[in-house]
Image (cartoon, grey):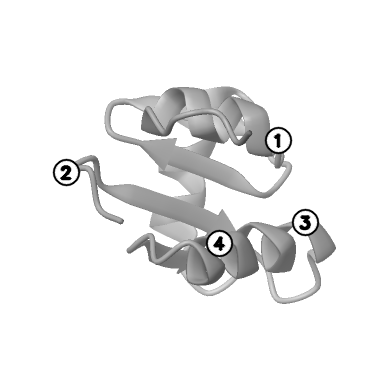
Amino acid sequence: MTNGKPVTIYTTHACKWCRVAKAYMKDNDIDYTEVDIIRDTEARRQMVLMTGQYGVPVLKIGPRAMVGWDEKEFRRLYELKPKR
């Protein structure tokens, strides 16, 4: 279910909500790139510059960023139709 917007998920291995977000992507056939901010310090720096925060998950959907996991907000940014 790709709409053309690239999705990047900034994560850590211990983050419960990161796992929830990745499971949602898998369950809905949404392609994404995962970036572990513990292993990739440059990506962590970019994430902080983008959001002003160190918390994960951060999802970059096209040019927009979302801090934390919120399915409704993700669907809005990714431009998915609301579930009925």
Could you tell me residue 81's position as x and y percent?
A: 45, 30
Q: 46 or 6, which is in the foreground? A: 6
Q: Name the residue that disc number 1 marks.
A: 70
Q: Quadrant of the C terminus?
A: top right
Q: Quadrant of residue 71?
A: top right
Residues at marks 4 and 2, CA–CA distance in whole angstroms: 24 Å
Q: Which residue position is annotated with label 2?
A: 4
Comparing 28 with 32, the one in front is: 28
Disc number lying in front (3 or 2): 2
Tell which tag, 3 or 1, sits nearer the viewer.
1
Q: Of callouts 4 and 3, which one flags the residue occurring earlier in the amino acid sequence?
A: 3
For discs 4 and 2, the disc positioned in front in the rendered view: 2
Q: Which residue is mark 3?
A: 17
Mark 4 or mark 3, which is nearer to you? 3
Q: Earlier in the sequence, mark 3 or mark 2?
A: 2
Q: What residue is drawn where x is 39% and y is 52%?
A: 8
